[in-house]
Image (cartoon, grey):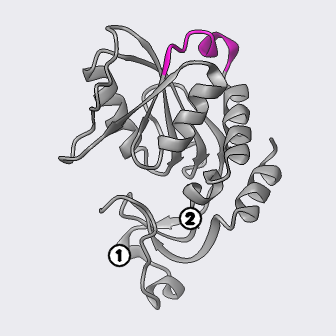
Amino acid sequence: MTEDEILAEFRAAEALLEGHFLLSSGRHSAYYLQCARLLMNPERASRIAVAIAQKLPRDIRSQIEVVVSPAMGGLIIGHEMGRALGVDALFVERPDGVFGLRRGFALSEGQKVLMVEDVVTTGLSSREAIKAIEAAGGEVIAAASIIDRSAGAVDLGVPFFPLIELNFPTYAPDELPPELAATEAVKPGSRKV
């Protein structure tokens, strides 16, 4: 899928929002990508996952034994990536503030894992998920996401394969441009900062 095709999918799902948003990273933006809306249609979610899977180098794709994604945002795309790759899809969650496997999920020592997110901005959630996967015995051989909002600047410590890199500017709370500072931020995501 091309960048225009991917953004067309977001627009068709009314998932590319404009306004003043507080991101889960704590940064502010005039744009928000609501991946839950993008992925609410199973056929679209499947197309997106297949497109991500096709971006993975063959040598990495052939080693993947399981997909693990962070809850909440990574659940649907993680599940669809499991389907696209023909492997199980687990997720880590943080009911007490720290990611971990629950619900009877377990990884074998050295099991080859693809960590999948919906959107990566600073990489904090992804790195926390990778740490939890490694603590559970998995070996994260790569990471993937629908969107890389850092436009290639983020370092997850493993090879990273986003479907699309975007450079929507983000701002620290004390760096807001006047047009954002004049409006109240909305927090559409699932995580409290």
Residue drawn at 72 percent across, 47 percent down: 44
Quarter of the image for the N terminus: give it.
Answer: top right
Above or below residue 151? Residue 66 is above
Q: Is residue 144 left or right of residue 13?
A: left
Q: Is residue 64 magenta?
A: yes
Above or below residue 176? Residue 42 is above
The numbered disc on residue 174 is 1
Secondary structure at numbered mark 2: loop
The numbered disc on residue 128 is none
Secondary structure at numbered mark 1: helix
Q: Position of residue 27 (x, y in %)?
A: 41, 65
- Which stretch did the figure color magenta? 57-66
Residue drawn at 41 percent across, 74 percent down: 175
Above or below residue 141? Residue 32 is below
Q: Is residue 181 left or right of residue 55?
A: left
- Callout 2 amino acid: Pro
Residue drawn at 66 percent across, 36 percent down: 49
Q: Residue furthest bottom?
A: 182
Q: Residue furthest left?
A: 96
The one of 22 and 175 positioned closer to us in this rendering? 22
Q: Considering only order in the chain, which callout, 2 or 1, is on the residue closer to the N terminus?
A: 2
Are dots 1 and 2 in contact, CB under 8 Å? Answer: no
